[in-house]
Amino acid sequence: ANSLASDWFDPWMAAEPPAPSGGQAGESTIDEALELTAAIVEGTGQPGPPDEWRLKRLRFLLLTALPELGAGEAADAEHLLLLGGAVDGLNEGRFLAFSETLLWVASAMLFSEELPPEAPLPADPEEPLEPSPDALEETGGLPEADRQLLGTEEALADAESEAGGVADLPLDEDELQPDAPPEPYRSPLPRALSEWLPVLSDAFAGAFSEVDPRINASLATAFDVAQYLQGTSRDRRRMLDLRSGMADAVAQMVLLIPDMGFYFDQPVRNRIVGQVERCIGFVADTDESGRPTLTREQYDACLEDLVELAGEMARKAELAGDPDGPYGVEQMRRELLMTPWQRINYTLGYLHQQEAGSCEPPEDPLPNPLEWSTLATVFSWFARQSPVYFQTPENEELLRRMREQGLELTESLLLQVDCISGAGAGVNDPVVRSLADYRQALESLVAGLREAELDYRAGILKPGSDVVLHRGADQETAFRNEGLSIGPCDAASVCEMTGELEATRALIGLFPDIYLIADQSGLGGVEICYDNVRWVNRRTEQVREDDTNVANYFGQLSFELVGRYRESGQLTEIFGFTFVSPSEYHYLFGAATEEILADSCPMEWVGSRIVTGLPGNAPIWVVPDRLTYLTAARSLPSRVINGNWSRNEEWRDSFITGLNVTPYLYPGDPGITTRVEQHLQALHRAEQNELYGALMRPLDGRSQTSIDSLFERLEEVNVRKSLVRGSTLLFYPGVMTGSDDIRGSILGYSGLLDRPLLRRIRESGLAVSAINEVGTARLERMQAQWDRQPENLRRSGSVASSLAHAMARINALHRMYFSRPEPPAEQPPEEGAKDSVNLPVFDNG
């Protein structure tokens, strides 16, 4: 992010010539630059490659015209140079650079406007508006303004007389007026931004949110500023609100806090705030003549207090965290809600606890880098308010102490990151360690979700269900109701067969998937039954040749197997088969009559008497001369079916192979698909509400079930993600503000999962079961992006810009007031060399 942009040094082969010089050169140059920038805005985000020459023409135009531009035009030229490059960078996904540039330009325009004075107090209504009668009398009865005008006219008449009359005076009044001053330059940039920003927002709002939703907030803030500045009226209250909003936008983008007051208005800073306000008050105080009243005692005391606050107060636990923890989930959640700098020692303590003995923690707690930078900046500003007071040995010592504090803080941070990164195999930097903790928490959450999902499904679905609730009714299923058995369809037509048969998976699989889905999801139920059990292909044989009264009955056993679907008391036949046994059975001994032969289920005849006479050729006469038989079943249908259903001839397989069966189809239920679809949707909504609700709502008591533990598991994920964010912002602030990929993985809508992002996922309709895939993919992407960072950066970290700027101000203060030139080094002159002057070398701090 800090390297030179190579495209600035490309040849300007297709660039436009510079604008002509002259009185209107500035305006025409800016107008032309606005047109080029508008074209860049219009082409950004459109299909196809962007026109790279537009940006080059813009740069050539402005850079060549800058020497001839006035102050206002030059400021606009600088802003357009930055905006043109930033907008063009949107095509390459450089969204953070665009936001930074936009905030800088909007801030520069806003703060360059002079703040209007406070409105005057309203006039006293009791004060007379007209002059008093005494005043009129003193002025000859005329108001003072008319009196002065009259005097002017009289003086003019006297002058005319002395000059010889009116004829010698100029007749054109314009000749008497001085030349009007040129109108001040009015920037057209606010109006242009008001037109460009909505276009860019429409094109990139979604992409901005993937990196950081705060970018959209920054764009909205800049738009408010542009809208206001394009008007002509200025309101003090409105401008103060805009300045405050701009400061909050910067705080959101850089410090990742909701607004400036989130940190700087905390009660724990009251002592620091009070001291800073007192010192500023000393500078602002003046006497009746407007001269400053700042005394040396006040000045020296302020400097000493600022150094003490930076060295002591900024290290306290409430401002810099406690390195001793505690590190429970609830405690970490509260601590990590603060800005990372405010919990620097807490974070370092946690990292050292994770790798006990690998690195030594700092001997003393480190000061809060943000707080120290703020105090150092105030120290630098205050010191410059009175250079005479500042240039004393005592204040030089204070400056040295402040500088030593900053160096110690900077070096300690770098040493801690280097030591932590070197512990273990590979580069185990703070972010890698935080990501490892996050992975464990995510895996625990996924395991809890899976367990809770299974428990919930067990309560609403049948055992063995494989239906996916968020898919449609047309999904395939391998579900088989293991508890299903085959019973009679109608007890009156089963011919003695009343037992239950085993329903195999193959038989259940004869149902179309839609009915199996309805069955396992509880909408209805499938069932298989047998019906119309009977003997077919019946015949008789005489028991004896000489006895035609009784006979043995033979036949094949036949029955129907029917698959039905039952829902809300309504039955629908789905499939059916008629089975005929391959073997013939002797099923009855009874009277040899056509009536019995015609009876397909002669069970009512069993046990009845058969009375017959003796044969007529009997050799003896017997009294009584008759024979009595009992009708008897020789093969019962129940025994035959049970004996061959799953063994012997295994009739159950015939319904799958098609042997010995005649299939027939039923039309089925024409509305089943719609009802199943609606039922699955209802179940899915209920499941998602239950599981997502458990993720979002805290528990009233101790967790008892798997679903009750989801809130705590997600809370752990939140804490670990906060640690990833804090570690990155604390030890690698330049990466967080310069890498769109890393920032997007932490803060964007496609970043590491946490509770707010799960709310968005829920609103998008993503199933709970997809959290594992989505969360893991995002984590792997973040890990890969971090692994691509330079190794030396990961091992040593980087310094926050606020800390670097504060150190630069302290060093500049030292060079300005206390650096002493070093004596020139004595070097023997070379032979033949002329005398030269050795320039002094100053300590650059």
Image (cartoon, rainbow, N blue to C red):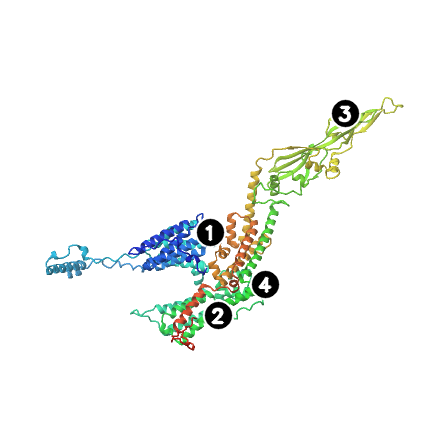
Q: Which mark is residue 286?
A: none
**N-terminal label among 4 and 1:** 1
Kind of residue at disc 3: Thr
**N-terminal label among 3 and 1:** 1
For disc 4, the marked residue is 425
Horizontal and vertical percent position of residue 733: 48, 61
Kind of residue at disc 1: Ala
For disc 1, the marked residue is 207
Kind of residue at disc 4: Ala
Q: Which mark is residue 593?
A: 3
Quadrant where the C terminus lies?
A: bottom left
Number of marks in the image?
Answer: 4
Residue 801 in the image: above or below residue 703: below
Kind of residue at disc 2: Glu
Horizontal and vertical percent position of residue 191: 35, 52
Horizontal and vertical percent position of residue 444: 58, 55
- Report the Cα–Cα distance between label 3 and label 1: 92 Å
Front-lying residue, 530 or 109 = 109
For disc 2, the marked residue is 408
